[in-house]
Image: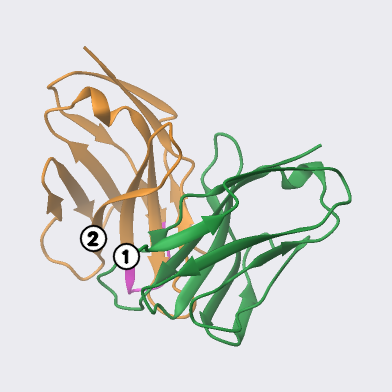
Amino acid sequence: AQKITQTQPGMFVQEKEAVTLDCTYDTSDPSYGLFWYKQPSSGEMIFLIYQGSYDQQNATEGRYSLNFQKARKSANLVISASQLGDSAMYFCAMREGTGRRALTFGSGTRLQVQP
Amino acid sequence: NAGVTQTPKFRILKIGQSMTLQCTQDMNHNYMYWYRQDPGMGLKLIYYSVGAGITDKGEVPNGYNVSRSTTEDFPLRLELAAPSQTSVYFCASYPGNSYNEQFFGPGTRLTVL
């Protein structure tokens, strides 16, 4: 069975600083995808970044980067130059490589950016 | 493209009532999903579909039913609502390409009193 663990229920960061949100995963499937979604207080799920299990390089999307350490089974999200609008819940998720292709989510990290 | 749409946005049900949550996508995706999100938690899979006419249970299917008669629509039926079904319900779709994310609808906030 797949499992995602986010050990930081809440994090604070100063505006313009970088922050790392932790995510570890467990799977026996050699093919999988790792995702980060942002959920602001309005409730929608916003896709941020994706990393495939066979990708050689860490994924980057603007201010977001994914620190993928396959041997450690970790997929931490790094947000550079934090902005007040980054305050939200952040979910790490994993998709199975075959079959139903559903997402398994972690419990989330609430990030608060302070001015 | 409208993406994934869900109706209603909010609903209050009494214990024992039934209702259908609607989900429609206009991206011709084969895979569709229903998740629920309880307060302060991540999303959990209720049901999924890999194409029209094909549905199967996820991790938390009890108290729910689904159907998939067309590629576009994937309604979720709640029979005999219970307070434990108070949650936010998200519908999502996915094209099947490894490098695409799941596309989520805006969610339906359901309260059962």
Q: In screen coordinates, is B12 left or right of A108?
A: right
Which of the colour schemes (rainbow, by chain, secondary structure, one colour) is used? by chain
Q: Main secondary structure of the magenta part?
A: loop
Chain letter of the residue carrying label 2: A
Residue B81 horizontal/vertical position (percent): 82, 51
Q: Do labels 1 and 2 touch, CB within 8 Å?
A: yes
The residue under label 1 is: A33
Residue B2 horizontal/vertical position (percent): 37, 62
**Distance between the alpha carbons at the discs numbered 1 and 2:** 6 Å
Which disc number belongs to residue A51? 2
Q: Is residue A46 above or below residue B78?
A: above
For badge 2, the amino acid type reads: Gln
Residue B95 horizontal/vertical position (percent): 35, 76
Q: In screen coordinates, is A1 left or right of A25?
A: right
What residue do we see at 25% from left, 71% from top? B99
Residue in the foreground of this view, choosing between B54 and A74: B54
Q: Is residue B75 magenta?
A: no
Residue B1 horizontal/vertical position (percent): 32, 66
Chain letter of the residue carrying label 1: A
Q: Is residue A28 magenta?
A: yes
Q: Which residues are magenta?
A: A26-32
For badge 1, the amino acid type reads: Gly
Residue in the foreground of this view, choosing between B26 and A113: B26
Q: In screen coordinates, is B51 left or right of A95?
A: right
Q: Residues within 10 Å of mark 2 (few under 14, many from 20)?
A: many
What shade has chain A been given? orange
Quarter in which the C terminus of chain A is drawn: top left
What residue do we see at 43% from left, 31% from top? A41
